[in-house]
Image: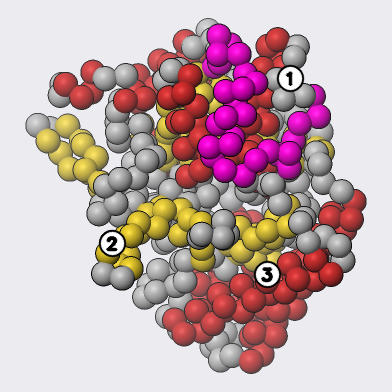
Amino acid sequence: MPAATHLPLHQQRYSLQHDRLIDRLATTDNLLIIQDLDGVCMGLVNDPRDRHITPAYVEATKRFDGHFYVLTNGEHIGQRGVNGIIERAYHAAPGAAQGHYLPGLAAGGVQWQTRQGDVSHPGVSKAELAFLQAVPDRIRTTLHHFAQTHELGLDDTTLARCIQSSALDNVASPTANLNTFHRAIGDNRAAYAALQRTVAKLMDTLLTEAAQQGLGDSFFVHYAPNHGRGPDGKEVIWWSQGDESGTTDFQFMVRGGIKEAGVLALLNRYYAQRTGIYPLGADFNVRQAPQSQADLLALVQDHFDPALMPLMVGVGDTVTSTVVTVDGEPVAKRGGSDRNFLHLIQAIGQRFNTGNIVVYVDSSGGELKNRQALQLEHRDGEPTVIAGPGDPRDTADPLTLNVVFPGGHGEYCAAFQQAAQRRGC
């Protein structure tokens, strides 16, 4: 066994030592798992309505109750929410899968849910929710108009399906998801690029209208996947080039609903359930959190008892980087909706010396083709990861993916379920 594989998991890069991860999950008492959903425990599909989850995985999460929370930009509730997927898996009526729902934060952190399915939106006003309610119809209207003014080559039935699949009527994060359109018109690259620009313009218009209604500080747009954040702090759209779909999800979200802030909200709840005291206060929510990682990390250091800090395990599947040339110099554009929350978990582990572990699930095997696969080769008969999901020229990426699952969500779920079985013994 190479010397590097003897290192602790948090010091490894692209490790395939799943047995060691399983052992840590199964035997660590002071443990906090924070996990994304799409692409991690469910396969990525063009139409979000086609997602499914296995009861075996859901049952495994119960063995980690109090130590496991989800953190997703999707939502728990609504027609496209994860709760409906769980209800179908258990053949339960809507709202009748109590005890099976996944606890944690959705909509980037502004939608909280318990295992029993009790949902709330901490820090979100009625006026904000009312504005969000009208966004899906605006998306549908924009898509209809686009189809009338561009030659897409789609019959009426296919067009109706694309529009229905693309307008996600989420309560706290209404979204234009262009995956189905890309699959249908991907060969017409000019039309798809124009569609991206049209939807981006709609998002800008919605932000302007919100400001006119006194909600100028209420919302932002999350682009997935993206090229990180620009100098103004806003996410950079990944415009389609060639066969790449680029940004497919345009999520109109509540400001403050960023996953890294959700890490603090979950850590605050974790401390409270173990000690009875909320380090950041019982009413703390993501909208009260600072936006920069440095400030988030300082907040953790100033308020959380190091002696009680858990081993944190962050699990995600969306991490990107692309090296481009700017003024003759290579510049790395780093993004992905899971990058920042995984990086914060890594930074907390380094600051508190707890050995936090970053887990990456390769979701490139799904229907979506905007994910770069891990590259493996066999050395001495053993599989070895030789390249990650980012640009191999990006050699200074501060995020280290400690343990990776090249086999995707099925491989990860199998390991998670094995750890749960051992933990419950």
Q: Position of residue 164 (x, y in %)?
A: 69, 69
- Tell me the CA gap for discs 2 and 1: 45 Å
Q: Quadrant of residue 268?
A: top right
Residue drawn where x is 55% and y is 31% of the image: 297
- Tell me the CA gap for discs 3 and 2: 30 Å
Give the residue number, with chain letter if any, for mark 3. 203
Q: Which residues are magenta?
A: 282-310
Looking at the picture, does residue 63 appear above or below residue 51?
above
Which amino acid is tagged 1? Tyr
How many residues crowd around disc 1 within 10 Å: few (fewer than 14), some, or many (20 or more)? many
Q: Is residue 299 magenta?
A: yes
Residue 330 is marked as 2
Nearer to us of marks 3 and 2 is 2
- Which of the two discs, 3 and 2, labels the residue nearer the N terminus? 3
Quarter occupied by the N terminus? top left
Which amino acid is tagged 2? Pro
Give the residue number, with chain letter if any, for mark 1. 278
Nearer to us of marks 2 and 1 is 2
- Which of the two discs, 3 and 1, labels the residue nearer the N terminus? 3
Q: Position of residue 397 (x, y in %)?
A: 34, 45
